[in-house]
Amino acid sequence: MSKVYFSTWRDEQINNIGKAEEDWAESAYNLPAQYDEHASSKAFIGWDGVALFDPDIDVVKLATEYAHQYQEYSEACGRCAPGRWGGRILYDLLDKIARGEGSVADMDHLKEIGKSMQLTSKCEIGKTVPNPLIDLMTHFEDTFLECINEQKPSKHYHEEVDYIAKITAPCMDACPSHVDIPAYIEGVRDVRLDDALRATRQTMPLAHTCGRVCPHPCEDECRRSNLDESIAIMELKRLGADYESDHDLGFFHPGKGKKKKPNGKKVAVIGAGPAGLTTAYYLALEGVEVDCYEALPVLGGEVTVGVPEYRMPWDKYAQDIEAVRDLGVNFIVNHAVTADEMREFETSYDATMIASGTRISKKVRCDNERPEIQGYWGAIDFLDWVNLYEKFDITTPEDVQKQQMLPSNFVDLKGKTLACVGGGFTSMDVVRCAIRAGAKRVVMFYRRDEKTIIRNTTYEEYHEAVEEGVEFIFHSAVAKMNDEDDVLKSLDIDKFELVPDPNGGRAQLVKIDGASETIEFDYLIPAVSQSADLKFLPEEWELEMTSWATIKTNGVDYMTSRKGIFASGDCEYGPMTIVNAVGQAKRAASVISRYIHTGEITITDDEIMEDHLRKMKVYDKKEKITGWLPGVPRQHSEVLHVDIRKYNNEEVNFGFTKEQAQSEAERCMRCYYIAMVAK
C-alpha cells in the first residue's frame, strides 16, 4: 500500500489536500508510487480513477496527456461514433484548456462527451478513458477554471514531464506472456487469421502449443466471466497457427515479418524447450546470432518428450519450432553441454541463456522407496519412452525394458496395474498415457481434493481422464512400497481428512487412524515434481541458487549472480507451465538484446508498467458488468469420443469450426484499458 495525496482509484475517496505528508492516508491498493529504483511517480491515472502522489502535479496537463494516449494507441475499434470521435474531442478540448485558450463551454462539453462515451461506447477503452478525466475535472475544477478564466497555460504545460503509458486488459495482464489477446480474438472475428497470429507472436512464438496445452490463466481473469462465462481464449489462439501451417503460407512473424540485419552479436542458449525456443526467437528477430544446444536427440524439450501426442501433436509443435528456425537459429541436438564448454561460452558468446528445464523426477518419500525396485518408474523417464516411440519411432532401450518388465521395445502395459502420485499436468499425462498403453487399472493418489487438481491442471483435462477410466483417490498418500525380490507387489495407502482450523486458518490434512489399506500394483510412478540437473555449471562460478536448488535470479531481468549468464524457465523457478516459461524467456531476451550492446541490465518502461499492473491486479472479480447481453453461451469444440481416443494417440480436441470460432470471438468485450504514470 502507498500513501497518496489524492485518489479516486476503484471508488476510494482519499483527499489529503492541505495536510502534511506525514498525515496522508494510505490507498487500499498497491498503486505505483515508486516508478522504479531511480524515480518516484507523480501520478497514476487509468481506467478506474486517478491517484496523485505529488501535490505539484499538473492535473490539467495530466488529463490532457491521458486523453492523448487514446489517440496515440488508436485502440478504439472505430465501430461506434463515441469511440471514434469522442476521444478526439476529449483531447482537443483538454489541450485547448491546458494551453490557456479554453472556455467554460469547453468544460461543459468535455463532461457531456465523457458521460456519453461511458454510456454508449461499444468497447471498454471508450467506456473507461473518460473515468479519470471526469474525476479530475470534478475534484480539481478550480484548477481547470483558473486556466480558462485567466487564459493561461497550466502550470507545467511547457515543461518536460515523462508520461509512460501502457495498454492492457484483464486477460493480457493475467497472461505471463502478456499476449495481446483482444487483438488476436478480433483477428478471428474478422476472419483475418494472419493478423490474429501476428498479434500472438508479438510475445508468444509457440502459438500451436499454447493454443492447445496452456492452462489459460487468462480465462480465470476474463471480464466476461463476471457476466456469464469466460471467453474460450486458448482455443481461439490455435486458429491462426493452424491456418498458417495447414495452408503452407510461410511464417507470419510479428511486425513486418522480417528480422533485423545481423548486428554481429552472438548468444548461446542451453536447452531447446519453450524457454530456450522463445529466447532464441526474439533474439533472432533482433538480428542476434543464436546457437541453441539441446541434450535430447529431438528439439522441443519437455513439450516434445513429456506432453503426449493426443494433447500436443508433434507436427503442430514442429511448426512452432520451425518458425524459430526460420529466423536463422542454429540448433545443435544430442549435445549435453559440459562445464568446460560453459567456461568457453563466456568468451565465445556475448551472453548465455540457461533454459535447461527440470528433468529429474522427485521421490514420493514413502517407506522402502528404492529406484532398483522393478515397477518403480520416474514420470519423466516414463513419458520420455512413451513419446519418443509414439512421435519418432524411437524404441525403448533394452536396459529400460528389463528394469520395467516390458514385453516389447515400447511401453506396453497390457494387463498391468499402475499407480501415480501427483496432481499436476505431468501426473495427468502419465495416467492418460497409461490408459492408452493398455493398463487394466490406473489410479492417481492425491493428497488434496478434486477442486485443487482441476485448479492445478484444467477442468477439461481432469474430466477427460475420468471419462477414459482413470481412478482418482483423493486425500490419500502412498506410505510404503512392498516388493518381493526387488519387484513391486503392492502399496500401503494412508487416508486423510481435512480438519478445520479452530482459529479460522487453513484446514489441515490429518491421517485417519485405521483407514489405511494395501493395494496391489505393478507400477508406481512418482509425478510429484521435478528437479534440475545443473552439473554442467562450473563449480567455481558459485552461481547463487534458490532453496529448491534452481538457479536464482531476481525474477525481473533474469540475470544470474554471474554477469552475462541468464536463466529462465523451469531451471530458474522449478517446474512451471509453458506460458510461464515463455513469459520469462521473452523478458530475458529483451534484456539480453540490450545487455550485449551496452553491458548494462535494463528493463523497458513497457516492462516496468507490466510489473506494476500485475501487482495492482487489473481484473476486478467484484465488478458488475452492464451494457452487454448476458447468457450468450460459450462455444465448446468437439472432442474425440472416449471409446475411440483411449485406444490411440490421436488429438483429442478437434478445435472450433469457423462458425464456432466467429461466434466465440463475438463474445469478447474488447476490454482494453489505458494506464499511465507521470514521473
Image (spheres, helix red, strand yellow):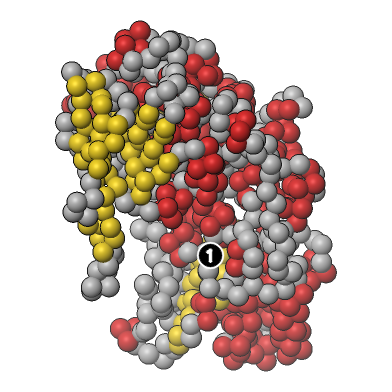
Q: Nearer the viewer, residue 329 or 649?
A: 649
Residue beneath the point at 35% across and 34% down:
419
Q: Position of residue 130 (x, y in %)?
A: 66, 75
Q: Position of residue 146 (x, y in %)?
A: 62, 89
Residue 515 visible to an observer of this rendering = yes
Residue beneath the point at 39% across and 65% down:
34
User: Disc 1 designates what residue?
Assistant: 619
Q: Position of residue 409 (x, y in %)?
A: 43, 10
Residue beneath the point at 70% across and 66% down:
631
Label 1 residue SS? loop
Q: Say which quarter of the image contains residue 212.
A: top right
Residue 362 visible to an observer of this rendering = no
Q: In the rendered view, does 393 fall on the left or right side of 492? A: right
Residue beneath the point at 64% across and 68% down:
227
Q: Is residue 399 above or below residue 307?
A: above
Q: Say which quarter of the image contains residue 276.
A: top left
